[in-house]
Structures are given as C-alpha cells and as structure tokens.
Image (cartoon, rainbow, N blue to C red):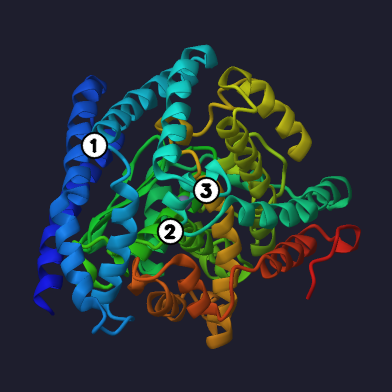
Amino acid sequence: MPEPIRSLRDHLAITSDLRSAAAVLQWDQETQMPPGGVMGRATELATLTRLAHESFTSPRTGELLAAAERVAGTLDPESDDAALVRMTRRDYDRLTKLPPDFVAERAREASLSTEVWKAARKRNDFAAFQPSLQKMVDFARRTADYLGYTEHVYDALLDLYEPDMKASEVDAVFARLREVTVPFVQTIVTRGRTVDDTVLHEDYPEAQQGAFGLAVAQAFGYDLDRGRLDISAHPFASGFNAGDVRITTRYKRRDLSEAVFGIFHEAGHAMYEQGVAPELDRTPLARGASLGLHESQSRMWENIVGRSRPFWEHYLPLLRQHFPGQLRGVDVETFYRAVNRVEPSLIRTAADEVTYNLHIMLRFDLEKSLLEGRVKVADLPAAWAAKMKEYLGITPPNDADGVMQDIHWSSGSLGYFPTYSLGNVISVQLFEAARKAHPTIDEEIAHGRFATLLGWLRQNIHRHGRKFLPREILQRATGSALTLEPYLRYLQRKFGEIYGISTAGAPAAAE
Ligand code: ZN
C-alpha cells in the first residue's frame, strides 16, 4: 500500500471508531438505558458526533486526501485503495459544508426530539410534538441548504441515504408504481377471494417466537458469533465493526408475523454488514452502499424468501414443533396465504407487500411538500389523512397511528423513506439475477438451504461495502440499471395467484 494511502487510512480509522462508539450508545439507548439517561445520553451522543465530524472534516483529512489523490492515478480503479480515495473525496466535499456546531446541535436536538415524540405518540398528542417536529424540519432544510442542490431541495437529503439518486428519478418510479398498485389493491379488495389470517393471531409465547426466528436467521447465514438479538420499541440492525452486527425485534403475543418476519428482515440487514470484506474495516467503505441496497437485502429475506411457498413447505413443520397446539391441522397453503394477506391498513411497518409502497409514496409526497413549504407542520395531520384516503382508501382514527407512527421525522431523517420502496424494487431485480445464475435456488429454499443465494449476494453485493455507488453495484450485479418492471410482474403474479384474480383489470406490467 503506498504510504499516502496508509496515512489516510490510519487517520480515517479515528472517525470510524468514534462513529462506532456513538452507534453503541444509540443501541444502548434503544435496548437497555433507563429513562433517566435521556439528557445525559443526548449530550454524550452530541459530543461523539461532533468529534467524529470534526475529525473527518478537519484540514488534516484534506491534506492526507490530497496526497493520496496524487498517487491514486497509479492504482487499479477497482482496488480498495482507489475506492477509498474516491469515496472519501465524495464524503469530504459534502460533509465539510456542514459546520461542526450545526452538526452537534442537530444531534442533540434529534435525540431530545425523539423522546418528545415517544411521549406525545403515547398520548396521541400531535400538538405536543409539533414544536420538535418543526425544529427537525428546519434542521433538514438547513442541512439541504448547506449541502446544496441543483434540481430540488429534496435531492440534497436523499443523497445522504441513496448516493447519486435524484427526487425526479424517484418521482418517475413512484408514478408508474402507483398507477399499477392503486387499482391492483382495489381489485384484490373488491374481487379477490377471502384470505383468512386468524392462524397468525393465536396465543404465541414470545420466547418460542424468538427461538424460531433466530433459528431461521442462522439458517439464512446470520452469524451469531458476530451478532445478537435484543428487544427494542423500534426494530433495527446496527453494525459496530466486522465482528459485531446486532439486531433487535419486538414481540406481539397475538401476532406471529411481527417478530418472526421482523427478525428475518433485520437479519437481512445484518448479513449485508457481516458480508462486507474485512479488509475494509475501519474505513468509510465498511458498510452498506446505500439504504436502498440495504433494504433490498432485508426485504429479500423477509418477503421473497420468507413469504414464499417453498420456504414454508420446509419451515411450517419446524414452526409447528414450537407451537404444536396453535398450528394443529394448519396446512402450508393456508399458512402461506395468511402471511401474504393484503389489506389497506394504517401502519406502514405492518403493511403487506402490495400496499406497503403506498405508505412510502404518501411520506415522500409530504416530505417534498414540507421542504418546499407548501405544507406547514401544523397542517400535517390533515394532509396525512387526505393522502391516506387517496392512496389506501382509509382514514386514520388518530394521529398516533397516523402522522406520528414513524420514528424518522422525530430525528430529522427526511429524505429516507423512498429508500424502502427502492429496496423492494431492487430486491426483485437482484433475486432474478441470482436465480438466473443459479436456477436451483428455489429448490434449495424448499429444503431450507440458503447458501447459494447468500453466496451470490456476498459475491455481488456485500463484499463491496461502499466501494462503488449503489447504481454501479446494481449494474454490475444485474447487468442493468434500476428497473421497476420485474418488481411489478412479481407482485402481480404472486398476489394475482393468491387472490385468484387475473391482473387484466390493472395496467399490465410489460413482460
Ligand atoms: Zn429495513
């Protein structure tokens, strides 16, 4: 390794360690910390966040980066070293635009605002949350102003989560997705056969749910020597380093899907982080390339694998060993349909595969309106209700299960939501590419074997970490750019069959 690259790497490891330490504190806040720790933790996180930001954006980083760039021309552009220089330049040019005071203040306020949101949501009191939310929207706007943008204010924020993606691209994908989904949901609701999911709502003790979920996650390939499962109010996966990538879940005793599919989902995120090449550890490249690619992994294991018929052919008998009474006499077909029941509903995280994206579009629309100033924070509950009616045909009975249901806005994470739907779209593209390379994948899933699929993901996605831009990784892995049509075909085929309807009524997805 050329000396200037080594110096840059050593220096960047400091930022990486500080960010990992902050992530441990955040994990602790969500899983272990007593309520009295809120104020102290907010300042601790603000300090670590400031130090990490100052270290990364320091003139020293600029000098080392410039020196590294002088030798980078002699490197193989595909090499780790060349990618490190490239991505560090990208990050550095962006993050140096954010003043350290601003970053620390934003982190502190976000930490406090999240606690305000938790309490306000419990009491269904939007008015109590409104001032905090206003602050977070202002922070998001100021962040966008510091970072700069050419087309739309939204682009500056989206780029933080989905590098190199523009709101106009999301608009185009969502317009087509909405055009197909809204009438498809209508057809399912009005003309589809009835799907009964009462089997999921028997009494399922939490301990067995966790044992089953974790056994499947391990079979997928989640390595528990480098991971663990805990309980939190809002499930997440968090990686601190190559040897420690954790997941959380929450249990509902009378809803089997919440924890079981939640664990599959978070394990998908965690396996991505566990699969990043160890040589990239302690560099800015040592994590997933974008939230969209991250979500493509979680949704693939949760839905394409975990909600498939072949999967349950193998796993229903094993689930029955955990719950013999609850699942007596339940056959695979009944269970498969139950876990794929489609119903317009209030809560995004509990939404089925078909209606899920409508929840995302609603949030994307509102975020753009907020940032453009077309909708005021005070008017958000009404705007939310109107969009719910338009997209899903239902009206939220209260704000707790409406505009206040997600944690994201409370921490100022505007620009984040579209990556969930992009992840859904990408998941099908990737799965089809993996299946094309290895036509035995479906057969293997039916026997509880996942090594071929995971191996393909490791080789084509995971190991790269952030070495390339998400669109480059997708192109390399599938041979094409982001494409919606495979996803539309997947939805129409799967749910058309479950609901016994032809999709002739809906605008057909091109073959
Ligand atoms: Zn996720």
Which residue position is annotated with label 1? 100
Q: Is residue 264 above or below residue 377?
A: below
Residue to which mark 3 is pinned: 155
Q: Secondary structure at mark 2?
A: loop
Q: CA distance from mark 1 to mark 2?
A: 24 Å
Distance between mark 1 and mark 3 Cα atoms: 22 Å
Instruction: Specify the quadrant that holds the C terminus.
Output: bottom right
Residue drawn where x is 72% and y is 47% of the image: 196
Check disc 1 and report its element: helix, strand or loop. Answer: helix
Comparing 418 with 70, the one in front is 70
275 left or right, relative to 450: left
The kind of residue tagged 1 is Pro
Q: Nearer the viewer, mark 2 or mark 3?
A: 3
Return the disc, 1 or 2, that comes first in the chain's sequence. 1
Say left or right for 370 vs 448: right
Which residue is located at x 76 percent, y 52 percent? 181
